[in-house]
Image: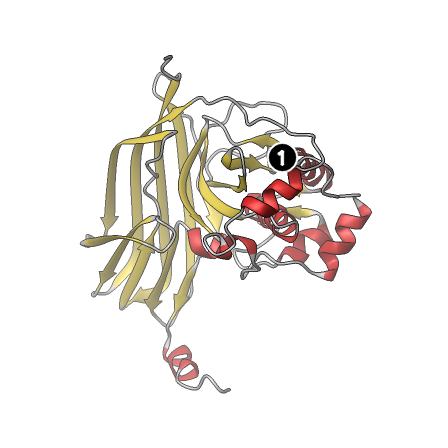
Amino acid sequence: MNTPATRRFLVEHQSSFHYAEPARGSMVLLRLQPQENPDQRLLKYSLSIEPDAATNAFEDAFGNTCHLFNIHREHAHLTVLSRSLVETSVKPPPEKHVDADNWNTLAETVDRVRYWEYLNPSRFVYMSSSLQAFMDEKDIRPGTCVLSALLETASKLHAAFRYMPGSTKVDSPIEHILETGEGVCQDYTHVLLAIARSWGIPSRYVSGYLHLLGATGDQAPAGVSHSWGEFWLPDSGWVGIDPTNNSLANDRHVRVAVGRDYADAAPTRGTYFSGGTSTLEVTVTVAESDETVPKATSQAERTNFLNISPVARTLQARPDQ
């Protein structure tokens, strides 16, 4: 039996939060630790926080490793730095099936209870009139082969949309990219998931990292995290497809967290207590073990933190208004 070829990546992910007015306290949930699975091994992992804080690790409902911490003192900034050494395996691509019973096999074998969350609409993944009109315009149809239909749809999304950092927000609905044609990996993935679920394919969101090669079709820039979709197929199990880069997920994709959509797999989420706003800068580097760590500039991102100011606290106490 041949041992599959492997690659090792050193991943650094730094999130720097700055507060316009000092925060009196904060509570933060992290999903930054890469997963362990048959195609990926986590060899080393470290997490540092400034100001210093003790973390509690736990597994969420989707099997993701989470770290939770609180800071109970005034602070003007918060920096979280995670370092991971990950080994990924090269695996053969899944086999395509062109028989007419391909979709029937999917319908008969999928466990609708087990995959309930991945078959039904979620906060950011849902069918809408705008999406149906988009599918009609681009002639997006199931076809005879489930995998071919997914790959062809990913290719059409790649051609129809333009990768544009800052064009959408963390909570932008899929209608935004459908109307403007611009978005980021999160938006591409949500659209592909929504289409796949409408066809009865269990589909989940994956957050992680991508080692950049400058390959044809690559759109994700250096310095950011990445996302793609995974789809359950009867003969192959979960198959990853990256619509942003028009490719199957492979040994240069590092998996961190999964969920129904971005809301379940966000790298950072939290609450801070302050009268001011906050800004977020993120720097991500992914280097193979035998190469120089690439240069990456900090990318401004919309913070995924809730500010509990005195006014907000009053509003939260009155959910009926």
In x, y percent, where is residue 52? 19, 52
Name the foreground residue: 292 vs 179: 179
Is any atom of residue 51 visible in this view?
Answer: no
Location of residue 308 with respect to 228 vertically, above or below = below
User: What residue is shown at x 24% (from left), y 44% (from top)?
Assistant: 48
Kind of residue at disc 1: Leu
The answer to which image quadrant residue 150 occupies is top right
Name the foreground residue: 41 vs 1: 1
In x, y percent, where is residue 234? 54, 38
Is residue 195 shown left or right of residue 6?
Answer: right
The answer to which image quadrant residue 28 occupies is bottom left
Is residue 152 shown left or right of residue 300?
Answer: right
Is residue 114 shown left or right of residue 241?
Answer: left
User: What residue is shown at x 62% (from left), y 32% (from top)?
Assistant: 246
In x, y percent, where is residue 235? 53, 33
- Helix, strand or loop at mark 1: helix
In x, y percent, where is residue 144? 72, 36
User: What residue is shown at x 46% (from left), y 27% (from top)?
Assistant: 252
- Residue position for label 1: 147
Neighbourhood count class around disc 1 (C-alpha, 10 Å): few under 14, some 14–19, many 20 upward: many
Name the foreground residue: 176 vs 33: 33
Location of residue 256 with respect to 276 vertically, above or below = above
Outermost residue toward the top in this view: 2
Is residue 109 shown left or right of residue 102?
Answer: left
Is any atom of residue 187 visible in this view?
Answer: yes
**Dividing the image into 4 quarters, which one contains the N terminus?**
top left
How are the colours assigned in the image? Answer: secondary structure
Location of residue 137 with respect to 146 vertically, above or below = below
